[in-house]
Image: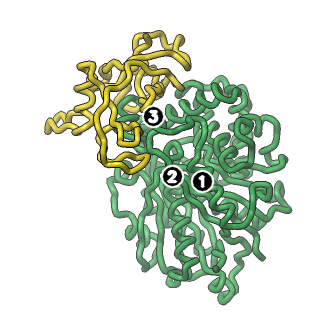
Amino acid sequence: MTDPETGVQDAGFDDWLDAAEEGDAYYLECANGHGSLPPRRVCPDCGSTDLEEVPLPETGVIETFTVTHVPTPAFEEDAPYATAVADFGPVALTGQVVGIDLDAIETGLEVELEITVSETTGERVIGLSPI
Amino acid sequence: MSNVRVAGVGLTPFGSTPERTGRDLFAEASIKAFEDSGVPREDVDALLYGNFMGELSEHQGHQGPLMAEAAGVQAPATRYESACASSGAAVRDAVMRVRNGEDDVVLVGGAERMTNLGTAGATEALAIAADDLWEVRAGTTFPGAYALMAQAYFDEFGGEHEDLAHIAVKNHENALTNDKAQYQRAIEVEDVLEAPQVSSPLGLYDACPISDGAAAVVLTSEEYADEHDLEAPVAITGTGQGGDRMALHDREHLARSPAAREAGAEAYADAGVDATEVDLAEVHDCFTIAEVLALEALDLEPIGEGITAARDGRTTADGETPINLSGGLKAKGHPVGATGASQIAEVAKLLAGTHPNSSAVEEATTGVAHNAGGTVASATVHVLEVVE
């Protein structure tokens, strides 16, 4: 998120969103093969400091989802919207399910990453688009 | 090692009092706890105080000394913040301080002012217990996160919304005798099923309310209690704490809470009891599904079976192991920073026979308090026993 007054971003996170918008989403892999999300200097599983950016698998699978009707103010205009946890293999992501009827969302659905924007704030949001 | 005695407890009413400041709430709880304990304020060696959203709701950081002042205690004071497990974490450290001989008397508790933020503001404030970058910015709310766990539970083990509704009905029923409870009102299964959805599959009646309130507990060493001839029949005999990855999506199981399992196992071992000896428990039912996950983590129900416990009457007031006889967070209310200490207060009173619902558990000697933060990235569990 870019601070509207100062223009300051969140290093690591906004860089990841930039990459994801270009179709170059990645995760961090440690020397022992554990996956994690940036910004990060240490593997949360094993403490390895040897982390490298590896392309995120193209598709993930919805593990669980919810349709939120009572949002925080930052998503007031977006509600109702669906949030899901999608397993991409080495890492899982929480994102908003886009491009599908809310009633049609189910566990097991295959999705790809698609960066979208909040209708309320215009900020970028991690989206999950069914294939 | 000294057993840590619960010498006195104090609670404010939990509810909607938006104009009351945190310092006023905690002052009231502390006055009651001191009166209940018979311990003079000057004997307090430390204040450990839980609070979660004071910066957002009151523009107030550095609350330790402020609350010591409010309670009339001249002792070093520290604020504990572990989201909804803030005062559970404070209680755990208080127990350890008394046990290792550092302190004889500790005032421990917490307070939260929430309703002045309004529903949208409180929803936003509660959401910061999740990972801001990777969860909140995708639209995760606190009810939404538990809804993700509920849906994962249904998919893995079965169960339906109606099963969860029985938990809400039970906890409202238990609160009818609790004059401090936010809701002293019976509800029916249909009320839960017909309530507006908050985050599917959870509706308004699956969620605890937004609450203002405070809790305070005076803990002393066994030696202090004996020397001063205190009426303190209940001791905290076991303490445990567990942790997990911050974001729900980083957990191995989305429908389990290993941090609570870890905390429970540690607390049981510490007290030298096992789950079969537990007569009653106050568990962290911020949402109906959370009670299910808590029962399974504490081995009070097998994995995948906790969903039927309330429906089938195993956890009702007349069941084998009554759960949340106070009304739980669901009906008693959930002033976040006060909740962990309030659970200790309720269990102590239930075991001492001084609680309005003690008649449901007359022979009880062992109780458990389970306090969880976030989507259970933090958990504390305490075992309380009647020792005299």
Residue type, label 2: Gly
User: Is tag 2's residue or tag 3's residue first in the polypeptide sequence?
Assistant: 3
Indicate the amino acid at tag 3: Thr
Say which chain is green. B
The residue closer to the viewer here, A19 or B289, is A19
Which residue does the image show at 22% across and 26% down from the upper left? A18
Judging by the rendered image, the residue that carries numbered circle 1 is: B262
Between B71 and B251, the one nearer to me in the picture: B251
Residue at the extreme left of the image, as rendered: A6
What chain is the yellow one?
A: A
Helix, strand or loop for disc 1: helix
Mark 1 and mark 2 in contact (Cβ < 8 Å)?
yes
Is disc 2 placed on a helix, strand or loop? strand
Element marked by disc 3: loop
Q: Kindly tell me whether residue B169 is visible in this rendering.
A: no
The subunit letter for the residue under badge 1 reads B
